[in-house]
Image (cartoon, rainbow, N blue to C red):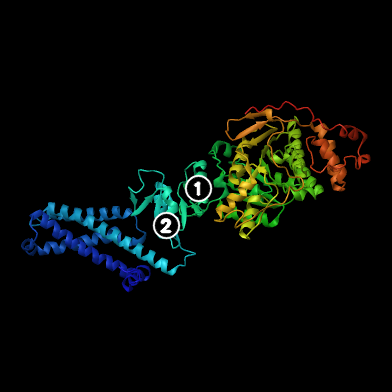
Amino acid sequence: MNRNSPLQFSLAKFTLRGNRRSRRLVLECFDFLIFSISLYLAIALRLESLLPLTFIQDNLWQIIVLIPIQHVVFRASGIYRTILRYSSLTLIKIAAKAVSLGTAILIALTYFLGDWALARSVLIINALLTLILVVSVRLILRWLIRKILSHSKRQTLTGACFTRLIVYGAGGAGVELLQALSNSPQYEVVGFVDDNTELQQQVSIDGLTIYSPQQLPSLWANHFFDTVALAMPSVSPKIRRRIVESLQQQSIPVKTVPGLGGILSGQVAIKELRDVDIADLLGRAEVAPELSLLRQQISGKAVLVTGAGGSIGSELCRQIAQQQPTCLVLYELNEFALYKIHQELSETYADIKLVPCLGNVTDGRYFGWVLKEHAIETLYHAAAYKHVPLLEGNIAKAIENNVLGTLTAAQSAIEVGVNQFVLISTDKAVRPTNIMGATKRVAELIIQALSAQANSGARFAIVRFGNVLGSSGSVVPRFHQQITQGGPITLTHPEITRYFMSIPEAARLVIQAGAMSKGGEVFLLDMGEPVKIYDLATQMIRLSGLTPDEDIQIKITGLRPGEKLYEELLIAGDAVQTTHHPKIYCSQEYFLTWENLEPKLNQLIGYARSNNLGIVRALLRLLVPEYKPQTIVTLNAGLEELTPNTQAVLTNSDDPPAALNLECNI
């Protein structure tokens, strides 16, 4: 049939827009014809005669009764309520049920009517033939309708919004994707690709050929397809990375199905194709979370998250909501960020008590009231300023938010009686070269010192990790924006290296690490292998179907103030201990007792409020001896304002305080 024939368009229009009653009438007419043909063939087979006209003529009234009975049973079974183009193999079950019921009724009649001429063997043969023909006709009609719709779709859609797919992976996920996209107005599957040589060219799926990966360049060059869809949700990250990189080298666009976890949980459907994300290329194998650890400090408890509207804070809220707390308090300074996360969680978790609180963690009176009012048992402190270059120029505000905010939150938690306090820290706190890292290390010292007090009450823990993909201010969204704008991508140094993990994985590990805490530990998350930011930039360019340094330039701008080439997770590398979780480690690191730390904190916060930055830097060096700013500041500036005792210590502050014995009994 010609693709553009009027008959085909008429049938397509009838299929899509025709009156449902009319379409049902057409199917019923088909079935009447099937009933007649099946019965004729059954009689012919039983009598072993091609033309049993005499028998039919003699028993015409029984045949006339039989066909309407079958039709009534078919209507009662609901077979005509199935939308043909969306029908699946469950159609066989419905048809088998209808045929079996109709045959049973007819056989029963043979017992009540002694002169019934149609033998039971004829009725059984008729049932088998009817089932075969009914199912076959419907499958053929479904195939024809889909073909017609596919041709119609090609003619009505432009090339920009209609995509021919080759599905990479001829397993269960690939077949499911084919079925899910069979009615899609945007995609058409034209073939499969699989590494299994036993499948290549030997087996077809719904009439589609299975090709080898080596055939892809030729198929791409001949414009056989537009995009490859990876249908391997359970494959290891390393294999996925290898496949994606090989496709990138050939400039073949790639999409992927959602991860296996999202499909199994019902959060996403397999047909929701997305672009390959940079996280797919990191080669990280996420370990399944231990549900007992996720629930331990959350399920049935009142939980509060500071910085609830931020990248980490908002994901923590999502993960916490899944574990059914009695109450989840969202504490956030930014009004719009608080509104967004509250709206999202309200729609997804309507059965959980959500309390949005607009406030600053430095406001001890209000923060303490919130903790007490909602009887908070578990607190995750994610609120912090994190942008390295910005904080180099806003030192006083960095001290206020990162140091005073942590101190206020921790002391309020002790006063109110919070059971567990988890500080979200950063790898930049290790031998920091910038204000952000130094202030986060001071925040760690606060938690360690308060935890060591005999009367602290709360179990304090620190969780330290590196960069998360897609967080506000990170390189990934910035690179995306620069690529969208046509470049160039700006990179501070060709050798700069960072650790990365996904935000959901980081949030899950934070919760599990906090649950393992006995008090005062510094937990380290396994960040996998470090990634060169230059390689990250080139991969993101290729993922966009472009060529580095041809379509998108990479411009080196030089290291920013306070920026390091490499990040670390440990201050003392030999002090790390394993835990029973393969992705979480525990570190023993020095800290100051509260008696020694408190007066220095008071000085630091006081001089920050008066914006005396010379003394602030000096005090940071005193508190964090490993802090080595790239731009050396004259530490003697303003020393006359310090106490004589502090001046004496400051002049000899290169050696860190002795490490206290902190056991990680986990």
The mark closer to the camera, 1 or 2, is 1
Q: Which residue is drawn at 70% across and 29% down?
A: 588
Q: Position of residue 36 (x, y in %)?
A: 17, 62
Q: Residue at x 94, y 40 (%)?
A: 640
Say whether residue 282 is left or right of residue 388.
left
Quadrant placement of the C terminus: top right
Q: Where is residue 482 in the image (x, y as percent from the top left)?
A: 64, 57
Disc 1, SS: helix
Residue 488 drawn above or below residue 246: below
Residue 55 image-quadrant placement = bottom left
In the image, 371 versus 311, the foreground residue is: 311
Q: Name the residue under label 1.
A: 246
Residue 187 image-quadrant placement = bottom left
Residue 10 drawn above or below residue 293: below
Q: Position of residue 167 (x, y in %)?
A: 43, 52
Q: Name the residue under label 2.
A: 181
Say whether residue 313 is left or right of residue 4.
right
Circle 1 crowding by C-alpha within 10 Å: few under 14, some 14–19, many from 20: few
Q: Position of residue 198 (x, y in %)?
A: 35, 43
Quadrant placement of the N terminus: bottom left
Residue 519 drawn above or below residue 39: above
In the image, 115 versus 298, the foreground residue is: 298
Type of amino acid under label 1: Ser
Disc 2, SS: helix
Circle 2 crowding by C-alpha within 10 Å: few under 14, some 14–19, many from 20: some
